[in-house]
Image (spheres, rainbow, N blue to C red):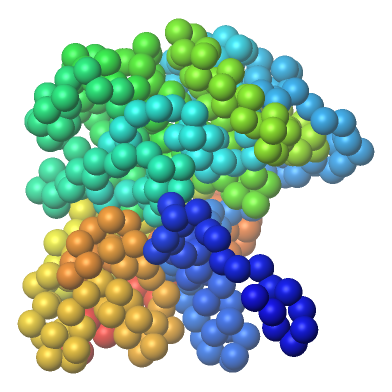
């Protein structure tokens, strides 16, 4: 076809992209920027970005390595991969070798490549992080979405998993398990993981265990599935959530030693796409994952602030007639406003998306609808990311006695608390 005398290409898009749009978390962040640019007061509880700064030693390491310019090995800098094996043994009790580790430009990219190279069905418990399902659709993988329930803590049960697998016991399958969870803030106990691992072992499932929020578990009780089901579990982690370095784009997989065919295939694709992860970032990451008391203190302080803030958020939400579980890690809470359905319906609000749109218009608070995370369209769940505060100031004023109380978060996390207050007052107005 032509336009003003010029040839314009016809549209010939991959049909796997039909219906896909920009990632919901990225879209909400851009919308917040646009609205703020128009002069509106916006409370950014949409994108799940750590509010805390990158630890000073890690920033210094990046500065010192800004000159690094070489293409590094596809699977990652050998020295970094060795440090990662030591870190995972120290933090999670995971025994692995350098050859088991692959580093990429964000765990998101590694997940995409994994789904590309693995020829099997993808099992995704819902609600789930916004990108798991779209990635599977892009690469054309069959997906089995399992709806979890509030009663189960939004967690998949062994019975649910077994019910799917026994229909075709020999089918190749990849289960994606994320905990602490985005969007619910819930996690799995060791007993729950052991029960799930029995089903995984029975059907020889491969599991992608997305433990990116592991070091934000409030009571430090995180258990890695790798220690329970080592032969079939891929550990996924990175710098973004515990180290405040989302934009640095560094993720990692620990792949079972019996599945080098998988990491080798991923490396082949990586070599033909992104080549290698940014050299300065990899050198800086060595500092992030090396044992260091200063970084341990940083992690503990961030975790304790998030824990107390989550308690304050829960105290505020609990004045409502809603169903909501107390978060166990990360920086999310996932309330269900179903008890308000009839009152909301009278104001033409019948879906989680309509709820979030009206909430933003009326109060300036940006949150994401449960439907973005795989819940039914008519659902009234939303994800609140309690991250709109100055993490640098909060850490700078961390008390000497390490006691984080409501007064502390009231002073240093005031914008988040004001946002939640607006949500509560708005719901109560119906």
Q: Position of residue 372 (x, y in %)?
A: 34, 62
**Residue at left 91%, top 38%?**
67
Residue 34's quadrant in the figure?
bottom right
Q: Is residue 63 left or right of residue 143?
A: right
Vertical arrangement, residue 402 with respect to residue 8, above or below: above
Say which of 80 and 215 sits in front: 80
Vertical arrangement, residue 352 with respect to residue 223, above or below: below
Can the viewer see residue 394?
A: no
Q: Is residue 50 left or right of residue 382?
A: right
Q: Is residue 145 left or right of residue 287?
A: left
- Quarter occupied by the C terminus: bottom left
**Residue at left 27%, top 78%?**
355
Q: Position of residue 429 (x, y in %)?
A: 20, 89
Q: State how many labels appear.
A: 0
**Residue at left 53%, top 35%?**
113
- Quarter occupied by the N terminus: bottom right
Say which of 280 and 417 sits in front: 280
Q: Position of residue 182 (x, y in %)?
A: 37, 49
**Residue at left 44%, top 27%?**
118
Q: Position of residue 239 (x, y in %)?
A: 59, 40
Can the viewer see residue 378?
A: yes
Vertical arrangement, residue 221 with respect to residue 311, above or below: above
The residue most toward the right is 67
């Amino acid at each position: 076809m032509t336009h003003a005398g010029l040839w314009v290409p016809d549209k010939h898009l991959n049909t796997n992209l039909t219906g896909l749009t920009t990632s919901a978390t990225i879209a909400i962040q851009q919308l917040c920027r646009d609205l703020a640019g128009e002069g509106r007061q916006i409370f950014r509880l949409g994108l799940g970005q750590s509010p805390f700064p990158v630890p000073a030693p890690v920033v210094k390491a990046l500065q010192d390595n800004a000159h690094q310019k070489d293409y590094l090995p596809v699977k990652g800098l050998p020295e970094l991969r060795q440090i990662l094996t030591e870190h995972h043994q120290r933090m999670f009790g995971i025994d692995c070798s350098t050859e088991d580790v692959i580093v990429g430009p964000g765990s998101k990219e590694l997940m995409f490549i994994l789904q590309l190279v693995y020829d099997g069905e993808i099992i995704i418990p819902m609600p789930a992080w916004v990108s798991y399902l779209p990635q599977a659709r892009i690469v054309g993988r069959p997906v089995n979405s399992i709806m979890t329930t509030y009663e189960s803590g939004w967690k998949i049960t062994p019975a649910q998993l077994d019910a799917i697998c026994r229909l075709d016991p020999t089918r190749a399958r990849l289960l994606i398990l994320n905990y602490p969870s985005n969007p619910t803030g819930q996690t799995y106990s060791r007993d729950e993981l052991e029960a799930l691992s029995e089903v995984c072992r029975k059907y020889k499932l491969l599991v992608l265990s997305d433990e990116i929020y592991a070091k934000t578990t409030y009571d430090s009780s995180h258990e890695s599935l790798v220690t329970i089901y080592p032969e079939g579990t891929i550990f996924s982690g990175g710098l973004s959530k515990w180290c405040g370095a989302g934009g640095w784009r560094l993720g990692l997989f620990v792949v079972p030693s019996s599945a080098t065919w998988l990491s080798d295939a991923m490396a082949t694709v990586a070599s033909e796409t992104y080549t290698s992860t940014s050299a300065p970032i990899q050198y800086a990451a060595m500092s992030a994952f090396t044992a260091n008391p200063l970084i341990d203190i940083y992690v503990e302080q961030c975790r304790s602030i998030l824990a107390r803030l989550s308690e304050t958020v829960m105290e505020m939400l609990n004045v409502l007639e809603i169903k909501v579980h107390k978060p166990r890690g990360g920086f999310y809470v996932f309330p269900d406003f179903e008890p308000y359905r009839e009152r909301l319906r009278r104001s033409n609000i019948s879906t989680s998306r309509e709820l979030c749109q009206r909430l933003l218009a009326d109060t300036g608070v940006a949150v994401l609808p449960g439907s973005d995370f795989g819940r039914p369209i008519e659902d009234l769940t939303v994800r609140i990311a309690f991250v709109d505060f100055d993490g640098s100031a909060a850490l700078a004023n961390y008390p000497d006695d390490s006691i984080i109380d409501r007064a502390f978060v009231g002073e240093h996390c005031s914008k988040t608390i004001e946002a939640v207050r607006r949500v509560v007052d708005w719901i109560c107005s119906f």
